[in-house]
Image (cartoon, helix red, strand yellow):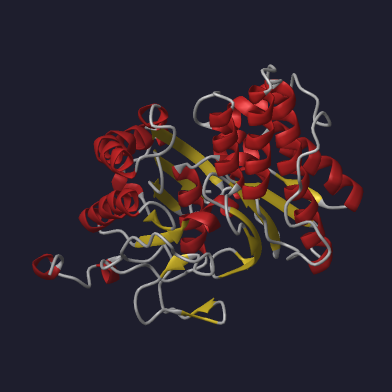
Amino acid sequence: MADEPLVLGIETSCDETGVGIVRGHTLLADAIASSVDEHARFGGVVPEVASRAHLEAMVPTIQRALKEAGVAASDLDGIAVTAGPGLAGALLVGTSAAKAYAYALGKPLYGVNHLASHICVDQLEHGALPEPTMALLVSGGHSSLLLAPDITSDVRPLGSTIDDAAGEAFDKVARVLNLGFPGGPVIDRMAREGDPDAIAFPRGLTGSRDPKYDFSFSGLKTAVARWIEAKRAAGEEVPVADVSASFQEAVVDVLTRKAVRACKDHGVDHLMIGGGVAANSRLRAMAERRCEDAGITLRVPRPKLCTDNGAMVAALGAEMVARNRPHSAWELSADSSLPVTEPHVPAPGHEHRHGVPHSHHHGHGHSHDHVHEVSKDNLYS
């Protein structure tokens, strides 16, 4: 274990400041500072509030992670950070901090993709990812079906949301039901008391001519809102538990149906589910049943590793180091729309070609002198 890469990961794509420390596939620390309570009164994440919260939380959270892991910053083999996608201002806080620490410590820097990190985190729970891996990522900002032959260099999008992501739909329905923000956990809780078959809500993009792997939850969200409005207009009480259960069932039905279909179509016998909505109990239960029926092995990390965290970034960073992938340049920039086809952002001259990075980068056991290609004088020029 001692010769496995020791990597610190920083995640600031949205409203959570996450710092994780990983050695190979072993999680040593997972420190999180969340600003979700500061956004609750606005009914959603406010980018400027998130960015300022990251600034305040960054150094204390890194110090907490190092203490929890029982390692010194000088022991690290690399520093990984979410370069995108996410909120631009929030990402900038993370990338700036990562560059500062990497430069000060003389360690290589790895700007990695948020979505690829959500897949890679499962290595901390269930060991090395099978290749290829089929992944269903569901969160507040993303609903994606991805095929990953190599998590460090080759991630292929099969389908994604064409409007609202699943997590967004949960938030919006919770708002209409006056359940507060964020909507996912509270709807999951209310749904346990309700009947999932009480109301026949629509299943978006499930027709024979619809895109096989894409998702749409905007129509469902509107249908739920109209149903609630009609009840209130008629002076009737809204059955919150039944609405929650029926809405949740519609979302989970579509997600699992399309994911299992993608596995069958591509001959993949493993399905990994990640992202914040993967913490949903009904999604886990239905995915388990459908995967079992189809002979597919289901991999879902524990709920804490499904939501945004630094451990997932560290996990992908450690994999980059282990596979000798090229480090990022000091000019690394935050990219709010970084495509999932780019699992990480290599330094110029090491760009990916056909999913294979070209690199002469040394392994983590070698000297990191190559990191100092930029002198302090021109670092900010």
Q: Is residue 113 left or right of residue 295?
A: left
Q: Is residue 81 left or right of residue 260?
A: left
User: Which corner quadrant holds the C terminus?
Assistant: bottom left
Residue toward you, 366 or 29: 29
Direction left: furthest residue:
377
Q: Which residue is drawn at 38% across and 36% down?
A: 65
Residue 286, by quadrant, is top right
Measured as percent of width and height from the top left, residue 80 is found at 39, 55
Q: Residue at x 41, y 31 (%)?
A: 36
153 versus 130 height, above or below: below
Measured as percent of width and height from the top left, residue 375 is found at 14, 69
Residue toward you, 131 or 72: 131
Query: What count of labels does the image hold?
Result: 0
Direction front: furthest residue:
234
Q: Residue at x 26, y 68 (%)?
A: 331
124 versus 33 height, above or below: below
24 versus 38 height, above or below: below
Direction right: furthest residue:
293
Residue toward you, 368 or 330: 330
**Can residue 107 be seen by looking at this rendering?**
yes
Q: Is residue 269 left or right of residue 8?
A: right
Measured as percent of width and height from the top left, residue 181 is found at 49, 29
**Can residue 301 be seen by looking at this rendering?**
no
Q: Which residue is drawn at 41% across and 34% down?
A: 32
